[in-house]
Image (cartoon, coloured by chain):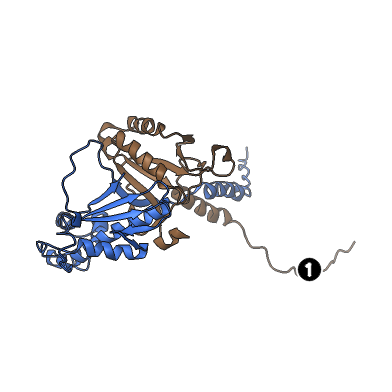
Amino acid sequence: MAKRSAPEVNAGSMADIAFLLLIFFLVTTTIEKDSGINRKLPPMEEIDPPIIKQKNIFTVLLNGKDQLLVEDELMEVADLRDAAVEFLDNNGDETCDYCQGNKDPRSSDNPDKAIISLKNERETSYAAYISVQNELVAAYNVLRNRRALEIGPRRGFRDMNFTQMQRNYKDARFVGNKEKLKALIDQIKLEFPQKLSEVQ
Amino acid sequence: MSKFKKKKDGGLPAISTASLPDIVFMLLFFFMVATVMRENSLKIQNSLPVANQVEKLDKKNPVSYIYMGKPSSGYEKFGTEARIQLNDQFAALTDVSAFISAERSALREELIPFLTVALKVDREANMGIVGDVKQELRKVNALKINYTTGIGDVETNFN
C-alpha cells in the first residue's frame, strides 16, 4: 500500500487563538508597583513614658484642614524637610562629632535624643499624612546620606550614599564585602536613629 | 470565452502572514510572565498617594493587604465615607483582628513574625479610619506595616 501522508492541519487560526490569549493576559496584567513607606507600630503594652526634655521634641501637627503646625508655627510641607534636618542635626550638647548643626542650646541635644512627634486629627486627609511622613523620612535620609558619603570612602565604599548602600546590600549582583557594608549601614542607622513617634 | 484574457499584472504581492503567530506568541509569553493576577477585586476607590522616600515591599516575607477608600460607583449603597475592604468584601473595623488571625493561620509558624500588613489607602480617605485600623493592628500585635504608595513628587498629593 502506498503510504498516505497525513493531511496537514490548517494553522491559519493559530493567530486568532494566540490573540485571544494575548488579550486575556493584557487585560489581567497589573505590572508590579508595590512600594511604600515602612513603619513599625508601637506595641500595645503601656510602658512608662520616659521623661523627655521639651527641647528634644519636634512637634508636627497636621490638622483636619491639612494645615501643618511645626513647633507652634505654621509651615508649608515643602519647608518641613529642612526644618527637621536642622532640628536633628542641631547637636546642642556638642556630644555628636559628626553633626554640622548650629549648636543652638534651645534645640535638640543630639540625634540620639531628638524625637519627632507627629500628631494628626481624624479629619486629616491620608494624602497629606503620607506627604508629611515622606518629608520626615526624607529628613533622616538626608542626614544618613551625608554621613554615608563622609565615612563610606574610609571603609571602602566610595561614592555611595545611604540609600544606594541599602539597595546594594539587597542586590544579589553586588560585588563587594556585604558584611562590611551591613556593619556600615547599621552604624549609620545608630548614628541617626529614626525616632518618630505618633500621638494617638 | 476568452482564452487569452490578459493577465492582470496585479499590484503588490500579498505579504506573508505566516510569522504572525510567532510574533503574537512572543507578546503572549511576555505578558504571561509579567502578569500578576489581581488578588482582590476592589469595591472601593483606591488611588494611592505618592511619595519619593519609598522602599520596595519585600515579597519574600508574607504580605496581607488592607484596602480603604470610599465605595466606588455601583456600591453607593454602602455610603460615601471611606470603608475597609478585606479580601473581597467590605468589612467592619472589628473584622480586622479576625482577618489578621486568618492570615496568620495560613502561614508557617516561623514566618508569622514577619507578616507585613500593607495598607492601601485612597488618597481622599481621612486619617480617622486609618488610625482606627492601626489601633486594631496594635491590639493583635501585627506591628509591621507598610503605607503603600506610588512613586512621585509629594506636591502632586495636594491637587
Q: Position of residue B103 (x, y in %)?
A: 36, 33
* Furthest residue toward right: B1
- Helix, strand or loop status at disc 1: loop
Subunit that carries the residue with mark 1? B
Query: Of residues A7 and B102, which is closer to you in this image?
Result: B102
Q: Is residue A35 left or right of residue A168?
A: right
Residue B54 visible in image = no
Query: Of residues B137 and A186, which is closer to you in this image?
Result: B137
The chain coloured blue carries which letter?
A
* Furthest residue toward front: A72
Q: Amino acid at mark 1?
A: Lys
How many residues crowd around disc 1 within 10 Å: few (fewer than 14), some, or many (20 or more)? Answer: few
Relative height, residue B94 to residue A5 (above, below): above
Q: Position of residue A136 (x, y in %)?
A: 29, 57
Q: Position of residue B126 (x, y in %)?
A: 43, 47
Residue B12's image quarter? bottom right
- How many numbered circles are shown? 1
* Furthest residue toward left: A95
Q: Residue at x 40, y 31 (%)?
A: B94
Query: Of residues B106 and A76, which is closer to you in this image?
Result: A76
Q: Which residue is mark 1?
A: B8
Query: Of residues A108 and B102, which is closer to you in this image?
Result: A108
- Quadrant location of the N terminus of chain B? bottom right
Residue A18 visible in image = yes
Q: Residue at x 34, y 49 (%)?
A: B57
Q: Is residue B77 left or right of residue B104?
A: right
The chain coloured brown carries which letter?
B
Q: Position of residue B71 (x, y in %)?
A: 53, 42
Q: Is residue A9 left or right of residue B96?
A: right
